[in-house]
Image (cartoon, rainbow, N blue to C red):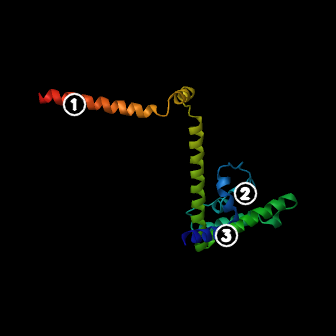
Amino acid sequence: ARSTCVGWRQAAALRLWPRLGRLPAAASRQSSGGPAAHDDERDAYQVLGVRPRAGADDIRAAYKSLAKQWHPDLFQGAKAVEAEKRFQEIAEAFQVLSDPEQRKIYDTELAVAKDAEARRKAAQRFRATSWNTPVVNVQERLRNAKREEPGSANGMVAAACLFVTVNFVLVFRFLAG
């Protein structure tokens, strides 16, 4: 039942903010900083330029300011196409963040996506260091393993047991008098 619920929430969050599906891959890349640079890599908070803990008034103010700045009617030609994309992004971000219930679902899925990215990066660091760690005397270990016969370990155990038993008997006889 839990996996169904999580799947439903994820599907709902992706409907609310389609770019969330690309967030883990996008989080590892850096934005070049231009106005339209890697727009689909940003989350709804970054699109509106607000902190994740921003209140409804801050979100509304950021939306109004950006909507005025990027309204497609203010641009012509190629800039109008870019402005239309930005304006749509801003409207989508505001739609998600202005509804408390949608925002809660979005925040949960955003945290899961970022945690998954952190786990992926940690696993990559582990693999990078573990594969680069030199193993000392690999060839010597292989030669020694080939030289040993399968039954030689049993012989060593038997010899050690015999040695301990003989020493125990000798010490016991010496102490007993």
* Residue 124: x %, y % from top left: 60, 45
Q: Is residue 7 visible?
A: yes
Mark positioned earlier in the residue sequence (2 or 1): 2
Q: Nearer the viewer, residue 65 or 24?
A: 24
Q: Nearer the viewer, residue 164 or 76?
A: 164
Q: Determine the secondary structure under disc 2.
A: helix
Q: Amino acid at mark 2?
A: Asp
Reading the image, the residue beneath label 2 is: 39
Reading the image, the residue beneath label 3 is: 16
Identify the image quadrant of the C terminus: top left
For residue 147, above or below residue 77 = above
Q: Is residue 51 visible?
A: no
Disc 2 vs disc 1: which is toward the camera?
1
- Residue 45 occupies which quadrant of the picture? bottom right
How far is mark 3 from mark 1, CA to CA? 81 Å
Q: Amino acid at mark 3?
A: Leu
Q: Nearer the viewer, residue 2 or 37?
A: 2
Q: Determine the secondary structure under disc 3.
A: helix
Disc 3 vs disc 2: which is toward the camera?
3
Q: Is residue 171 left or right of residue 62?
A: left
Identify the image quadrant of the N terminus: bottom right
Q: Which mark is residue 169?
A: 1
Q: Is residue 152 left or right of residue 30?
A: left
Graded by Cα atoms within 10 Å as few (under 14), some (14 to 19) or many (20 or more), the crowding at tag 3 reads some
Q: Which mark is residue 132?
A: none
